[in-house]
Image (spheres, grey):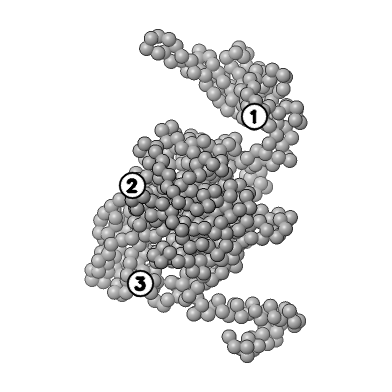
Amino acid sequence: MTPRLLKGLLTLLVAGGLIAINGPTLVSAGKNALHEYKINSEGYKQRNGHWSMLSVPEDMRVNAIHAALLRTGKVLIVAGSGNDRKQFNAGKFRTILWDPETDRFTRVHTPSDMFCAGHVFLPDGKLLIAGGTRRYEKLRQNVTYAAGVMTVKDESPDGRPVTIPKGTEFLSPHGIAFRSTKQVVVKPAVKTLAADGTAKVTASATEVWVEAAHEGRASVIDHSTQFTIGGTHRDSADLYGVATSLTRAKQDYWGDDKSYLFDPATEKYERVDNMTLARWYPTLVGLEDGRVLSVSGLDQFGRIIKGDNEIYDPATKQWAAQPQLKRTFPTYPSLFLMPSGKLFYTGSNAGYGSDTVGRDPGIWDLSDNSFEKVPGLRDPRQTETSGSVLLPPAQDQRYMIAGGGGVGDSDRSTARTDVIDLNAAKPHFAPGPDLEQPVRYPNMVITPDDRVVITGGSTGYRGANDSDLLLCHIYDPQSNQITRMADPTVGRDYHSEALLLPDGRVITLGSDPLYSDAQNTKPGTFEKRIEIYSPPYLFQGDRPEIASGPVQIDRGSTEWFGIPAVGAVRSARLVRPSAVTHVTDVEQRSIKLDTRRNGDGLDVTIPSSAGLVPSGWYMLFVTDQNGAPSKAHWVHVR
Ligand code: CU
């Protein structure tokens, strides 16, 4: 823009009463006008893409904690209680659906608090959601009564189950009293007979949360202590309580064990079997046979789960513990299904966990529970809140880990990206390009042109010190280059998500900063605005179109799709829709398809590996010589 043009524009704004006339304001208004002019020009959009705000009706604005793209093209946005204690206490849990085709929002009845659950798509396109919140955390200053987990043991194999009512008193040898906060039923001990006829008795163990009868420090128990149980009329030598830690420490969020299917057809939740363990911040990952592995999380009393994993079978709608798959990860670990059926753990996680256990990236073989570590990751102690993605195309088996920070609320964060090629004889991480700034919570979205949009995040823990990054980049795995794009206007840190829409745009939602000011003195507010990024490929003129083709496709088969102007098409990709929370999206992947020109269309071959193309619904995209993708044609791969 020439100075004359700028002056003209300013005069126009001033004359229109849009800006007041004073020096500094005039300059800043001028800069803003110039910026607006620049980012809205066609040339700029062609090179940098474009951001726009989605208009969301007031009553549909929710704290977006989870987002998933359904096979109907609608986006499921789950808040649950939305990290809002008032909503939790009121039993108000929210889910909304947004249809990008019509821009219509609808409300979905949400039966329990799915805040911080895990989710994954099943082969039939339903979304399995498991876990969530059973109780909010209790901060140290609010814990006045010592409390914790009491294990009730029954050593008598001859008794019947014993009901311990809520409020039952547990008494230590020194007369310190605790009361149970819930009714539990204690099973009898188990007696087994060895071949030589000797009997072995294994005591049963049932956990219950207890609270001290009296306030203050005198009730704190910090070593293994046996308690007698009041009112049970049983020999206390057989039935007793044991606790090692009943303290006034901060009490973490309690996990939930409920699980649901969200059906895109009925747009309703269906309750299914409870998980064997309550989990808050679990990762659910689909296996090559269509079953789902649920890993990690905080349990029913807010303790990190130490290696107890379980599997959901869609055929029976049941969960089953997997004691043979004992392996500990921090919460929300990034686990990806490999073509071999093994799982790759990139080292990324979100939330909680030991800073040493389960942090090393590697390949987990579920057939024998072995774990092969992979070397070379830089800043290995800064993987929490990092982003991980299976780079497109999935056949190349190259994974990127980007950004991240120290465990917990550490103020360390990194700009590192590293890439590993699992097809290599000896896989090891190699440096990718550095990000512009150290970043936690980068959202990474695969696009149909084999690139990755990396957007948002903050340098500090949960946006601390006003550190949201209004930055968006595109990474090209082929050239290993990262390029700055148009800037988003909304910061996205903790509890934020981004995903690819069927029309090729990228939606960004959520953000949960701890503070709202640079000095970290004022509480933050949840970001409810939704901003959408249109990558440069949407400004390259005509887009190819998939006009016809089948919906049901078998793995390994070749199918014909009608594509007008097929001569311009250069590639075809199957993109698995995202189901994302806490920067963790183990669903999205883009699979390269072999194609052959056939009349006014393409013969497209789906790879035969279920580890590469797990059963489920996918978006088929074709992309032309300018990198412009078609809109998606949904297919169901079996
Ligand atoms: Cu969370």
Q: Is residue 195 toward the left or the right of residue 17 in the image?
A: left
Q: Which residue is mark 2?
A: 340
Q: Amino acid at mark 1?
A: Ser
Q: Position of residue 38 (x, y in %)?
A: 56, 79
Q: Position of residue 212 (x, y in %)?
A: 71, 28
Front residue of 149/502: it is 149
Indicate if the residue with disc 3 has its beta carbon within 8 Å of ligand 1: no
Badge 1 marks a residue whose secondary structure is: loop
Mark 3 vs mark 2: in front: 2
Q: Amino acid at mark 3?
A: Asp
Contact between marks 3 and 1 (CB within 8 A): the answer is no
Front residue of 28/375: it is 375
Is tag 3's residue or tag 1's residue first in the polypeptide sequence? 1
Is tag 2's residue or tag 1's residue first in the polypeptide sequence? 1
Among the 4 quarters of the image, the one containing residue 559: bottom left
Badge 2 marks a residue whose secondary structure is: loop
Location of residue 134 with respect to 599 vertically, above or below: above
Q: Is residue 121 toward the left or the right of residue 32 in the image?
A: left
Q: CA distance from mark 2 to mark 1?
A: 43 Å
* Circle on res. 624: 3
Residue drawn at x 56%, y 69% as measured from the top left: 487
Location of residue 237 with respect to 35 vertically, above or below: above
Among the 4 quarters of the image, the one containing residue 91: top right
Q: Position of residue 318 (x, y in %)?
A: 42, 37
Badge 3 marks a residue whose secondary structure is: strand
Q: Is residue 223 visible?
A: yes
Q: Which residue is mark 1?
A: 245
